[in-house]
Amino acid sequence: MPTHTLNKLERLKGHTKIRLLFDAGEKFKVFPLTVIYLFEDRKELAQISSPLKMGVAVGTRNFKKAVDRNLLKRRIREAYRIQNTALKQQVLASPFELSLFYIYGDNQIHEYANISMAIKKSLDKLQDLLTTKMMKNND
């Protein structure tokens, strides 16, 4: 039985790493989320850290109260934590690291079920992208 975790090593932290993701990464939208992702070749020294890292942001423009922003971030993290097992196994088997960042883009607070469906769609799309990237890498 797989464990559903989102520990400290799996969180995307650090100004330089996040800046690199926003500058060089690609993005797609799954309402109400925007997903920014970046595949990088796995480094030899990165055996200690996780090859799959994620971050979350909810804008102050749409939600003035920190309580609302924190609620949405908790919902996104929880949905990701429950559903990321298949993607995590695929990334571990690949020669790549994956950094991804979720940005909440709507001005209404959606239910957990809606956010969970958006996370599921985004993780499925990321799995497909990783599969195609691995096929291109093998050629």
Image (cartoon, rainbow, N blue to C red):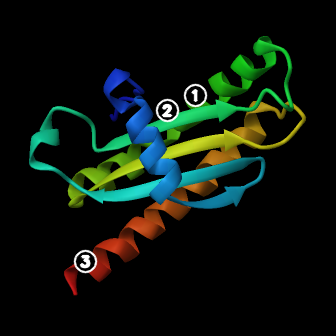
- Rendered location of residue 129, percent (x, y): 45, 69
Q: Is residue 103 above or below residue 129?
A: above
Residue at 22%, 87% (x, y): give it.
Answer: 139
**Callout in the foreground (3, 1):** 3
Quick one: 3 or 31, which is closer to the camera? 31
**Type of amino acid under label 1:** Glu
Q: Answer whether labels 3 and 2 touch (C-beta < 8 Å).
A: no
SS assignment at label 1: helix
- Rendered location of residue 82, percent (x, y): 51, 34
Which residue is tagged 1?
Answer: 78
Residue situated furthest left in the rendering: 44
Q: Is residue 95 above or below residue 132?
A: above
- Rendered location of residue 53, percent (x, y): 39, 39
Residue 81 got which mark? 2
Using residue 24 as the reference point, say whether residue 74 is left or right of it.
Answer: right
Q: Residue 4 appears in which quarter of the rendering? A: top left
Which residue is tagged 3?
Answer: 137
From mark 1 to mark 2, how far is it between C-alphas?
A: 5 Å
* Structural crowding at the residue carrying mark 2, measured as other residues with C-alpha within 10 Å and reported as few (<14), some (14–19) or many (≥20): some
Quick one: 1 or 137, which is closer to the camera? 137
Q: Residue 107 appears in which quarter of the rendering? A: top right
- Rendered location of residue 78, percent (x, y): 58, 28
